[in-house]
Image: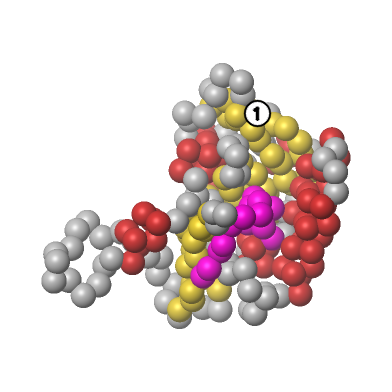
Amino acid sequence: MVGEGVAGRSTRALRAQDALKTIAAGQESPEQVRRALEQALVFAGAAFAAVYAPSADGELLCLVESVGVPRTLCEVRDSYPVAGRSPAAEAHRGGRPVWLGPKDLAAQARSRRVPSRDFFLAALPLRDGGCLLAVSERPGGFDADGRVCLLDLTLADGRLRPAVADASPRTPVEPAGFGREATGGRGVPLVEALSAAWGTLPGSGGKQVGAEFVLRR
């Protein structure tokens, strides 16, 4: 998650955002989804990117469009059960991005049908249902700018995305409970209750925590 302000955003992230705005400004066409996905290859460093949408009965996430290397090379399927344990299904159900590295994928390859080679995989929920699935073969996977580009692909206009950063790499967790006199521990529950989605990104030895808020007119 990142803030909507220009400050702190790299040239690559800004160029990706401009490209996506240009695509969105045009009339809808069968090529629009593909053109947007191609930005994931150019700006996020993905080797493969795809959009999945729920089937008519809501039981499956079905491939709508993909770009990059053949999906068979990434061991990516053309559909995933919505109730399953795949990263795509978890992102769709949970409404939060799923970021997995080679070790994570190796442990899950058999049970979740995800890439079993040295891939990095990202599954990001789409606002209207379904998910964006992206695979990187770069050493280290998706860097901070690459993750920003992928997040930009999944968001439509009408959302505010503030973020804060600190020097601790530790991911915030929701406390089991806290008393009325507690001086801390309320941040994560408040963000989770008030936002449409929230998450973290690594950066500069620490982390960035951000949330998405739907703007209502």
Q: What colour scheme governs how the chains and residues are painted in the rendered image of this protein?
A: secondary structure
Q: Is residue 128 left or right of residue 211?
A: right
Task: Give how far across and how far down residue 58 sits, in percent.
Answer: 55, 24
Above or below residue 184? Residue 44 is above
Residue sitting at x 36%, y 54%: 193
Residue sitting at x 63%, y 74%: 5
Assign a secondary structure to mark 1. Answer: strand
Identify the magenta region: 149-163
Task: Give how far across and how far down residue 191 sits, in percent.
Answer: 39, 61
Q: Is residue 139 left or right of residue 207?
A: right
Quarter of image, res 22:
bottom right
Please check the rendered image and state whether residue 158 is part of the magenta-colored stretch, yes or no. yes
Q: Is residue 75 left or right of residue 12?
A: left
> How many tags in the picture?
1
Between residues 112 and 209, which one lies in front from this camera angle?
209
User: Three-letter amino acid code at disc 1?
Assistant: Cys
Task: Give how far across and how far down residue 128 sits, in percent.
Answer: 60, 39
Residue sitting at x 53%, y 22%: 59
Task: Give how far across and how far down residue 109 sits, in percent.
Answer: 54, 39
Whether residue 41 is visible, yes or no, is no
Q: Residue at label 1?
A: 62
